[in-house]
Amino acid sequence: MKTSRYFFTLLILAGLFTACNEETIEIPKVLDEVESTRYFNAEIFSEQDLKIYGTWKIFDISGGFHGLGYDPDFDYLVIKKVEIYGFVKDNSLLEYGKIVPALWNPNDLRLKVDFEKDEQSGSFFSDRVKYVHYTGNDTLHLSSPCCDRFNYHFERVE
């Protein structure tokens, strides 16, 4: 009886220990070779827009003609200082370039960005103009400015 009680207690503790461990995510470092001053020598985003920097894991793509989106065909969007972006799948760089604020409309306070592909980069992302908004500090949404285009939803991992 004592052996089974000991075994049962050990089993519960082992279950609690493994439930508390978070999944380890390997952060892609593929943009490390792109110099931070490749496109700009100084920061061009406003102070309030700096939280766009980081590694973002895609979790949903919505919208499109039927509104259903499609299954993600990449893993991460990495945005590093100063305005450098990269789309990553299986730790390989699909496309990189500069991300810049689009023309500002005084009647619209949202950040609008253009993804401008580098001439040396492969081509992957075709819907290049997006509005940026956040849910809390850890969820990034890139929304289309118009109809029948796709919206991308990310979770911050770094």
Image (tube, grey):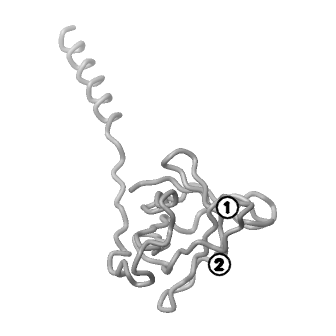
66 and 6: which is toward the camera: 66
Mark 2, Cα crowd under 10 Å, few <14 / some 14-19 / many 20+, is: few
**Residue 43: x percent and y percent?**
44, 72
Residue 92 lies in quadrant: bottom left
Q: Is residue 34 left or right of residue 112?
A: left
Does residue 39 lie above or below 60 as drawn? below
Q: Is residue 106 left or right of residue 153?
A: right
Element type where label 1 sits in the image: strand
The residue located at (33%, 75%) in the rendering is 32
Does residue 9 lie above or below 47 as drawn? above
**Residue 113: x percent and y percent?**
61, 70
Label 1, on which residue? 143
Extreme residue toward the front, this view? 106
Q: Identity of the amino acid at label 2? A: Ser
Q: From the image, which quarter does the N terminus lie in? A: top left
Q: From the image, which quarter does the C terminus lie in? A: bottom left
Q: Identity of the amino acid at label 1? A: Ser
Element type where label 2 sits in the image: loop
Label 2, on which residue? 126
Residue 140 lies in quadrant: bottom right
Q: Is residue 17 left or right of residue 91?
A: left
Extreme residue toward the top, this view? 1
Extreme residue toward the bottom, this view? 119
- Mark closer to the chain start, 1 or 2: 2
User: Which mark identifies residue 120?
Assistant: none
The residue located at (51%, 57%) in the rendering is 48
Mark 1, Cα crowd under 10 Å, few <14 / some 14-19 / many 20+, is: many
**Residue 150: x percent and y percent?**
70, 65
**Residue 61: x percent and y percent?**
64, 60
